[in-house]
Amino acid sequence: MALALADNEVTYWTTILVLGLVVILAVVALLSVLVHFVKLIDTRVAAVRDTLEAVTENTKHAALIPKTGDGVDAVLAEGLRHHLLLGRAAAGERS
């Protein structure tokens, strides 16, 4: 028993196999692009995470800001008192 295909069946199967190969290549290309984008997103998420950790580290000592501001105000007030005292002393020497 000889198994032979007609010309139209050969053309049909050739077309189906070529289309299957094209679909497989398209899937491989799309998956490669997806893997590339996932790696890119992962890299950028890591950068955002590092930035947020740096912000957390910077704001960890935020409770010290009011104390520092009070200290600066005290130094400024002391400097102003010295300025007034020296200004009065200089005015007393001139008169």
Image (cartoon, helix red, strand yellow):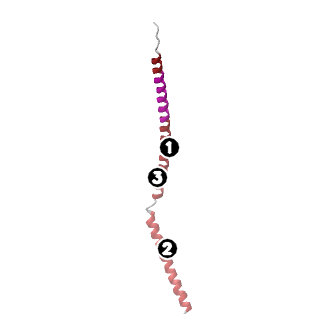
Measuring from the top left, give residue 51's x and y in whole percent.
48, 52
Badge 2 density bin: few <14, some 14–19, many ≥20, Cα 10 Å: few
In the rendered image, which residue does mark 3 sit on?
A: 52
The mark that comes first in sequence, 3 or 1, is 1
In the rendered image, which residue does mark 2 sit on?
A: 75
Please state which of the two labelled residues, at mark 3 or mark 1, is closer to the viewer: 1
The answer to which of 56 and 28 lies nearer the viewer is 28
Residue type, numbered disc 3: Leu
Badge 3 density bin: few <14, some 14–19, many ≥20, Cα 10 Å: few
As helix, strand or loop, the secondary structure at mark 1 comes to: helix
Please state which of the two labelled residues, at mark 2 or mark 3, is closer to the viewer: 3
Measuring from the top left, give residue 78's x and y in whole percent.
49, 77
Per the image, is 24 magenta? yes
Point out the stretch of residues depicted in magenta. 14-30
Which residue shows up at 50% across the image and 30% down it?
Answer: 25
In the rendered image, which residue does mark 1 sit on?
A: 40
Q: Main secondary structure of the magenta part?
A: helix
Which residue shows up at 49% across the image and 25% down it?
Answer: 18
As helix, strand or loop, the secondary structure at mark 3 comes to: helix
The residue lying furthest to the right in this view is: 94
The CA distance from mark 2 to mark 3 is: 34 Å
Per the image, is 28 magenta? yes
Measuring from the top left, give residue 39's x and y in whole percent.
50, 41
Which residue shows up at 48% across the image and 57% down it?
Answer: 58
The CA distance from mark 2 to mark 1 is: 51 Å
The mark that comes first in sequence, 2 or 1, is 1
As helix, strand or loop, the secondary structure at mark 2 comes to: helix
Measuring from the top left, give residue 67's x and y in whole percent.
44, 67
